[in-house]
Amino acid sequence: MDVRVLAHHKHHSNCTDVTDDSQCSSWFFSGTALKPYPRQHDYLESDSVYKAAPLQKVPTFTTLVLFASCVLESTPYVKKITSSTLELLRRNVDEPFILAITCRRPMAAFEQHADAILLAPCAAARGYDSGLWQQGFRYALVSNLLGSASAVLMINDSVLGPLFKLGQTRPGVTFGAVWLGHVASSAMSLYGEDVIRSPTFVHYWNRTHFYCAKWGSMRFLEGTLAHRYQSAGFRCATWTADIDEYRKITVPPLRLPFYKHKNPPTSLYNEYVTTGRVPLVPTPTQPAPLIDCTTMLLHSYQLDAQRFVPEQATQPIDGTP
């Protein structure tokens, strides 16, 4: 079917096994046990496809973009920043197929720029960005989008970019930012073909049990992200090892392809509030070269194995290699 055709969608009003935020906060900081323990959810959410369902023919593309977003279409700024991100992904990613995964009825920008849209409110409530990316991954797996991709880019709505053409994806994993002695940012990560064909990648995204929303996403995804792929022998690259530079979207000279624009910082929004105009982000005149971070000492969070190691679902969805 035409990917611009909207499919029928039944909105999810009740989500089971969504843990209270106060419990999750206590669990994150002190290891307090969750009661009851969240159930595993091994499936693609029913009625989750909003647009392009199902794909009758897999299109020709190179990079599968999984864009996770729960933004509300409430202000001119939100509309502009979301449209800009999707336009930049379309323009500067190597032959993209853009799969947007959201927790609410998508704004017009999604329908205009995305090739397919999934609604996954319960996955978002349980797993935050990780839950949305997992739903996108599972859909890509069963629809053979993953099998047709040469690279996968995962990005959320806190990042603007890429501000310049990325070119062909190199082997291994490329992060928007990493910082020595800590972790890689999960807000944007780009995986080469060697990674996306590996059990390290496929089993993690298909089988990991995500819960506790943002707290769990920080523990189970960002907290182990770089270390997971380094331990499996994949190469690591980044455009900056300075997390502060990653946040300085309004401070020239801009040299990075991706910049955080919220959570923090808020400088781009503050500029909009002050001037009444949605800022235009210029193209970097001297793009930063990639830094090889394969030998950097990138740690995972120091997790108690019993409390924090992600659970593995016993019944992965159909299509697992």
Image (spheres, grey):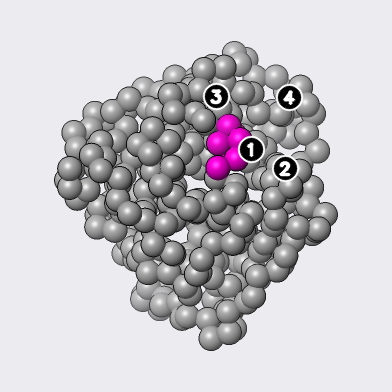
Q: Sequence-wise, which precedes: disc 3 or disc 1?
A: 3
Q: Secondary structure at mark 1?
A: helix
Q: Kindly identify the amino acid type of the residue bearing the numbered disc 1.
A: Thr
> Mark 3 against mark 1, which lies toward the viewer?
1
Nearest the camera: 17 or 168? 168
In three-dimensional space, the C-alpha distance between marks 4 and 3, rounded to whole angstroms, equals 15 Å
Q: Which residue is mark 1?
A: 200
Range shown magenta: 197-204
- Against 140, residue 186 (above or below) is below
Q: Secondary structure at mark 2?
A: loop
- Against 316, residue 21 (above or below) is below
In three-dimensional space, the C-alpha distance between marks 3 and 2, rounded to whole angstroms, equals 32 Å
Nearest the camera: 198 or 239? 198
Q: Residues within 10 Å of mark 1 (few under 14, many from 20)?
A: some
Residue 29 image point, x, y percent? 73, 34
- Against 155, residue 57 (above or below) is above
Screen quadrant of the N terminus: top left
Residue 194 image point, x, y percent? 59, 49
